[in-house]
Image (cartoon, rainbow, N blue to C red):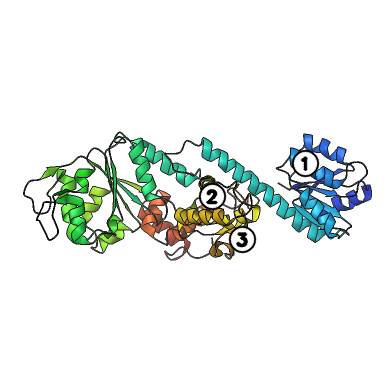
Amino acid sequence: MAARVLVVDDDPSVCRLLQVGLARRGFEVMLATSSADALRVLEKADVDVVLTDVLMEGTDGLQLCARIVAERSDVPVIVMTASQHLETAVGAIRAGAYDFVTKPVEFELFAVALERAVRHRGLTAEVERLRRAVEEAGGFGDLVGTSAPMRKVYDLLSRIAESDASVLISGESGTGKELVARALHRQGPRSAGPFVAVSCSAIPEGLLESELFGHLRGAFTDARFTRAGLFVQASGGTLFLDEIGDLPLGLQPKLLRALQERVVRPIGGEAEVPFDVRLIAATNRDLHRAVEKHEFREDLFFRLAVIQIELPPLRARGNDVLGLAHHFVTRFAEQAGKKVRCCSQLAAERLLAYPWPGNVRELQNAMERAVALTRREEIAVEDLPDSIRGFRGRARLNGEGSGDLIPLAEIERRHILRVLDAVGNDRTRAARVLGVDRKTLYRKLARYKGGDGRRRTA
């Protein structure tokens, strides 16, 4: 739909000139020849932006701007005047104007300012919608996000929370795998028991065996005390094995036997010790490929992956970026004792355009930094890290581009290629995200071009 502009000027000829010129540039234009008329229009009509002259009889443009900001803060106001004096511009900004333009009319400049104001209103409305959605959404535990990929994750989590079956969570680094594991623990019947987490990549192989299965006193040098392993320590609760794809091959048969028999044998001991845990594992590796390359045991993979959860990368979660940014800003502002709202329009555009290779963890760090640096009540572009400020891309709101009508097959093709890009061209993972088997995905890619799917840009 065309953006709706309310033009306010007490000179009817100027109103008609602006109406014709802006209509030619795709705007729907409404007219008012006084501040009182403009306020009556705003009471009845949904307006995207107000363009008002400063010098008018009765209530002038700056007073009108202040009134609109106070009563309809969602509608940006652009002030226009024949004066180029700094005092006039300062007065407009103090009145809460979004922008300031000078006469004589240059339609291209006016159109650019109006388009920016319309985008600002859209982003502001989207941030507010996402804030309400985050507060009201029936998500899962502390997980934040209302995008379609995350709703699919929530649905799966809600169905498996009561189960004791082993879960394998896969996804890129920074997507929140441990957060999902903790949410599953808290929502399940073992929530009163311990949640014990260990990274399989952070501990040397010799120490990891002792960490998992325990040891007896004197079993090796420096083993001065008998120590229960994490399987036993987590009994009655959940054991979370992060980076399971980095588990040394020598330990994989021992872990497999422990999961099959539900007992562990401490290092240096002869008696087996029973345990009662729900096992959740996580990895950023493609374990299917690791199995094919004989880097991971197939039988252990199937034992771990009774239920598989694929977490989408942040770049595939659409406007969840803004919802998460608001969530983090609120948290860090409270911790710092600062009054900081979410983001300016330009900052929100940069957040939406950025591809987030570090996923949610990178966004969290960026928002913590921004809250620490800002001296305003909202995050500005200059508060963001250099990598985000300097990235050149186009912000994209969910559902945009409705004027581009294309065949359903083309929509499917673009979506498949976008998912492939999001998962680093890993076809096994892409098939799981798309909900199809690998053969179906291969057939579709072959139809696009020789199996690589890169005939045209998505």
Residue 22: where, in percent of width, then height? 81, 53
- The answer to whether 457 appears left or right of 79 in the picture is left
Q: Nearer the viewer, mark 3 or mark 1?
A: 3
SS at circle 3 = helix
SS at circle 1 = helix
Label 2 to label 1, Cα distance in Å?
28 Å
Above or below 249: residue 93: above
SS at circle 2 = helix
Amino acid type, mark 3: Glu
Q: Residues within 10 Å of mark 2 (few under 14, many from 20)?
A: many
**Which disc, if any, is residue 43?**
none
Q: Earlier in the sequence, mark 2 or mark 1?
A: 1
Name the residue tied to disc 3. 382
Quarter of the rendering containing residue 441: bottom left
Amino acid type, mark 1: Ile
Name the residue tied to disc 1. 68
- The answer to whether 225 appears left or right of 330 in the picture is left
Tell me which residue sits at (79%, 40%) in the image.
67
Residue 225: where, in percent of width, then height? 14, 51
Name the residue tied to disc 2. 325
Tell me which residue sits at (10%, 45%) in the image.
272
- The answer to whether 430 appears left or right of 393 in the picture is left
- Residue furthest to the left in view is 270
Residue 237: where, in percent of width, then height? 26, 39
Q: Residues within 10 Å of mark 1 (few under 14, many from 20)?
A: many
